[in-house]
Image: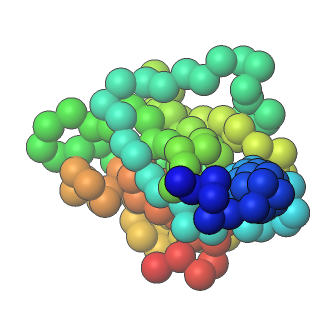
Amino acid sequence: MISSVYPQSQPQAVLVSRLLLVWGMLVVLLLSGLPAAAESPSLALTALNIRLSHRPVHPPEQLIRRSFLLPEIRAARALVGPSPQAAILEDDQRHRVAILSILDDGRIRADLLIDLDLIPYFPDLVSCARERECAYDRRPLTGGLACVAICLQRVLDPSAP
């Protein structure tokens, strides 16, 4: 009985309008899912999260854009429990930006997974690590390598707490 209520042309118009609506929603969803780094590199560096790993994390060579040794920065070993061996800085969608690793000789290596020149940030990074006393802070969650990761997070995003 539905066909008697609506003329024959209206269901086709409704179908076309619904298809256009669905198509428009798909376009909006696809465009909103694009990374913000394509528009502005600084947007990708805001609100970075830090994850710690008690095992070394070695990203595949093809993902590493740049690798730096941080010779002037030391990280204390945890007083209780195992010390973190890696700190991963990533955004909320788990797009990794950098991985900090402690080498066997105690030096810290930063593997950058995005195109970013870390050299201009070195003075501020070293200054932050010295102010926070990362080389002597042995607390499990905020000391040692986590302390250095917090400094890198603050240097890359000055609005970070």
**Residue 111: % across, % down:** 66, 36
- Count of numbered circles on the image: 0
State left or right for residue 24 relative to residue 78. right
**Residue 81: % across, % down:** 14, 37
Q: Nearer the viewer, residue 160 or 123?
A: 160
Quarter of the view holding residue 125:
bottom right
Residue at horizontal 42 percent and vertical 70 percent from the top: 132
**Residue 26: % across, % down:** 73, 51
Residue at horizontal 36 percent and vertical 24 percent from the top: 55
Q: Nearer the viewer, residue 97 or 72?
A: 97
Residue at horizontal 80 percent and vertical 34 percent from the top: 65
Position of residue 93 relative to residue 57, above or below, is: below
State left or right for residue 55 relative to residue 153. left
Residue at horizontal 47 percent and vertical 74 percent from the top: 131
Residue 135 in view: no
Question: Which residue, as the protein is rendered here, is positioned at the far left?
Answer: 80
**Residue 54: % across, % down:** 31, 31
State left or right for residue 81 relative to residue 108. left
Q: Nearer the viewer, residue 6 or 92?
A: 6
Tell me how the rendering is colored.
rainbow
Residue 109 in view: yes
Position of residue 122 relative to residue 53, above or below, is: below
